[in-house]
Image (cartoon, rainbow, N blue to C red):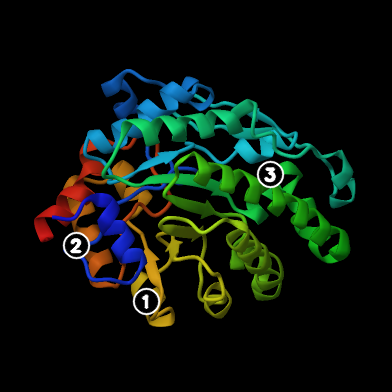
Amino acid sequence: MLTPKERLKNVMEGRVVDRPPCICPGGMMNMVTQELMETVQVFMPEAHTNARKMADLAKAVYEKGCFENYGVPFCMTVEAEEMGAKVDMGSMIYEPHVIEYAINSVSELDKLVPVDLESGRAKVVLDAIRLLKQETKGAPIVGNLTGPVSTASSVMEPVVFYKELRKKNKEAHKYMEFVTAQLIAFGRAQIDAGADVIAISDPSGTGEILGPRFFDEFAVTYLNKLLDGLQKEKMGTIVHICGQMNSVYKEIDKVRSDVLSFDSVVSMKEARENLKDRVLMGNVSTYALEFGTPEKVHKLTKGCIKNGSDIISPACGLGMKSPLANVKAILECLKEEA
């Protein structure tokens, strides 16, 4: 019987498996819920700044039968904070978020500081990955990065950033080069620490927000620079994009990740028709996982398999109040179907 790590590796490499893997990467796609924290008595926000607690929560996700992977961190603010943004660390029911931007314009690039891998929350994440590497086996460790456009629009006001892609195009590219270089450094460090897979979530880099032209010029370009800048991973890379894809399927197919992941507004059947040769991941409704029933989650899981999803996962992570019975229903369904 395949281990979870073997199953995911085989799928990423296009080989036949006994059933689809069931993962929730971490990062934007946080897999930790309030009920899980209460079950193992390890809590956020402390787990965002303590490597031991971060690793223990990541282990609980796998050990309690939720998903077949470990994944850290549990938010998408680490990179922005490291570059100078101020972050509210959240609570047991909501995730960290930026409360003060580091710069006001792409023209202020010189004010930014590079990510320091030896201190702060970047070091916490790397230490948590090292603990997971030492203490676990059989399931993949997923390291997470916030995508280039999403990081860039967390370091400064998003509306200003989007305007300046056009108005200050040359400076915007310099800014994106800097941001992407920081992500490469952080991603390489996660691989060195023991991550098997790197998942990149870029929810702000959508075709709906950027339009096809800027999606290609900025989202695709810098996702590929990031992917190309990571050393050869032991297993591979996942890129998650939010929003509708129907205007940018041609552009998203240029992204050189091993796996493409979409949220629940994207029809998996439509994605499969437009991306015939790609490994696809998704996309059980986050809303159903929080507010539905295990029976509803079973039905949605079966639909994802039928419509062409190779890796089954929540569409965009989990609401913190999602019942564990609903969360576990995805994996339970896959095991029943095998």
Amino acid under label 2?
Answer: Arg
Residue 227 percent location from the top left of the image: 58, 61
Q: Nearer the viewer, residue 201 or 303?
A: 201
Residue wearing tag 2 = 19
> Is the residue 64 above or below the residue 220 in the image?
above
Query: Of the residues under marks 3 and 2, which one precedes in the sequence?
Result: 2
Residue 125 percent location from the top left of the image: 52, 33
Q: Which mark is residue 218?
A: none
Secondary structure beneath label 3: helix
Task: Examine the rendering and report whether any part of residue 92 can be seen.
Answer: no
Residue wearing tag 3 = 154
Residue 110 percent location from the top left of the image: 88, 43
Amino acid under label 3?
Answer: Ser
Crowd tier of the residue under label 2, counting other residues whose Cα lies within 10 Å: few below 14, some 14–19, many 20 or above: some
Residue 198 percent location from the top left of the image: 48, 51
Say which of marks 3 and 2 sits in front.
Answer: 2
331 to the left or right of 228 = left
